[in-house]
Image (cartoon, rainbow, N blue to C red):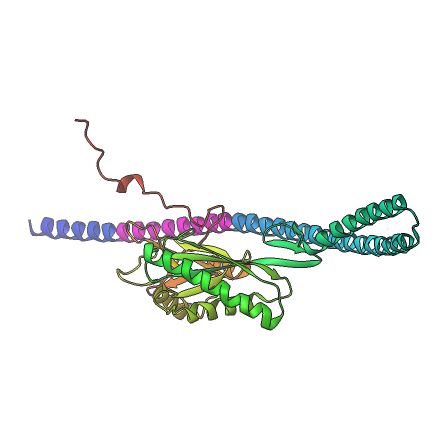
Amino acid sequence: MRMVKEFSGTVAKIACAVNVDDAKDRKKAEKLRRESNKGKRDKEHKKRQQKRFDTLANRQKADEKAKEEASRRVKEAAEKTVREEAGRLTALEDLQKKQQEIFKKGKQSATPKEMETNVEEQKKVQAQINKIESQQKVEKEVSGGKGKWAVGAKRTKMVKVNVIHQKPVDIEIRRRATKTTSKIIDLWKEETVTEGRGMWTLLVAPGRERKEESVFEIGKVPEDVLDKVVVQKLLEGLKADGWTNELAMWIFLDASERVKVRLPMAPVPPGMGRAQMREELQKANGGIAIEGRLPEVWGKLRNTGIEFSVSNIEEAKKAVFKGVTWNGHKRRVEVVTGERENTPIKTPAHNRGPRPQAS
C-alpha cells in the first residue's frame, strides 16, 4: 500500500513537471507568435507609410511644377506689360510731334475753314493722347497662379498668416479683428509715403480654418520682400492695437513643405494646452522640428491621439520610422495625407450612443 502511494506521488510529480514544461513552452510559443505578428504589423505599417510618403513627394513635385509654370506666366505677363508700355510711349511721342506740326499749320491758316479743320485735327490728336495717358495711369493686374500677381512690370505675392487665440473665435474677437485690420491699413498708408513703397492689401477671416484661429492675408507684396518682414509688419500693427498673448497666443506662416503626422494612440491628460503639448513633445524627442500649428488633440471624444506638423518630408520620415515618445512610451506615428485642414473628425459608430426609439 505504501509503495502504491509513493508510486502515485511520483507520477503526480512527473505530471506536474510535464504540465509546467508545457505551460512554459506555450508561453514561449505565444511570445514568439506575438513578436512575429508585431514584426509583420510593423513591416506593413512601414510599407503603408512609405506609400503615403511617395504620394506626398509626388504632390509636392506637382506643386513645384505649378509654381514654376505660374512664375513663367507672371514673367511673360510682366514682359508683355513692359512691351506695351514701350509701345505706348513711342505712340505718345509720335502724337505729340504730330500735335506740334498741326499747331504750326494752324498759325499759318488763312481762311476760317482751314482754321476750323486745324482745330478738329488738334482735338482728335489730343483725344488719342488722353487715352494713352489714362492707360498709363491704370495699374494692370495679371493673375499669375496661387498668391502671385504682376502689377505693372513688378511681380508680387500674397502672404498668409494664421493667428491662434486662447479661446474659440466669438463675436468679440471678430469685431476686434475687423477694427484692427482697418487700423493696420491706415498705418500702412502712412508708411507707403515715408518708405516710398506700394500699398499692401490686408484681409482677415476669423474662424475660417479653425474655430480658435484667424487668418490674415497680405496681398500685393513685392516678391523680393521676405515673408518674415511681412509678418513683422503685421505683428507691429497687432501690438499697436493692444493685441497681447491672450489674443495672439501663436502666429505661423502657411508653408506647403510641411507634413502633418499623427500619434493615434497617445492619450492627452485633461486640461493640457496645445503650447504645453508642443513643449512636452520637443522635450521627450530631442527638439523635434514641430512647425506651423500647435499640436492638436485627435479623436476629440476620448482624446486618444495627437496631430502636429513637421518642417518637411525628411523630418516626417524620422518621426514615422523611429517613433515618437509621449508620456514615457514610444508611440507609433502615421503620416496624414489627403485630408483637408478643416475636415471635422467623425464620431466612431460605437461612441454615438443608443439610437433614438421611434415614438
Can residue 190 be seen at all in this image of the molecule? Answer: yes
Answer left or right for 251 relative to 141: left
Percent position of residue 202, x then y: 51, 58
Residue plotted at (43% across, 61% down): 163
**Which residue is the extreme one toward the bottom?**
194
Main secondary structure found in the magenta portion: helix
**Which residue is the extreme one toward the left?**
1
- Range of residues picked out in magenta: 21-49
Quadrant, the C terminus: top left
Percent position of residue 18, x then y: 25, 50
Q: Nearer the viewer, residue 227 or 32?
A: 227
Can residue 291 be seen at all in this image of the molecule? Answer: no
Q: Nearer the viewer, residue 196 or 30?
A: 196
Answer left or right for 323 relative to 192: left
Residue plotted at (30% across, 39% down): 349
Residue plotted at (37% across, 49% down): 33
Percent position of residue 354, x then y: 21, 36
Percent position of residue 243, x then y: 39, 68
The quarter holding residue 89 reads bottom right
Q: Can you say whether 79 is above or below 233 in the image?
A: above
Answer left or right for 348 relative to 139: left
Q: Nearer the viewer, residue 346 or 109?
A: 109
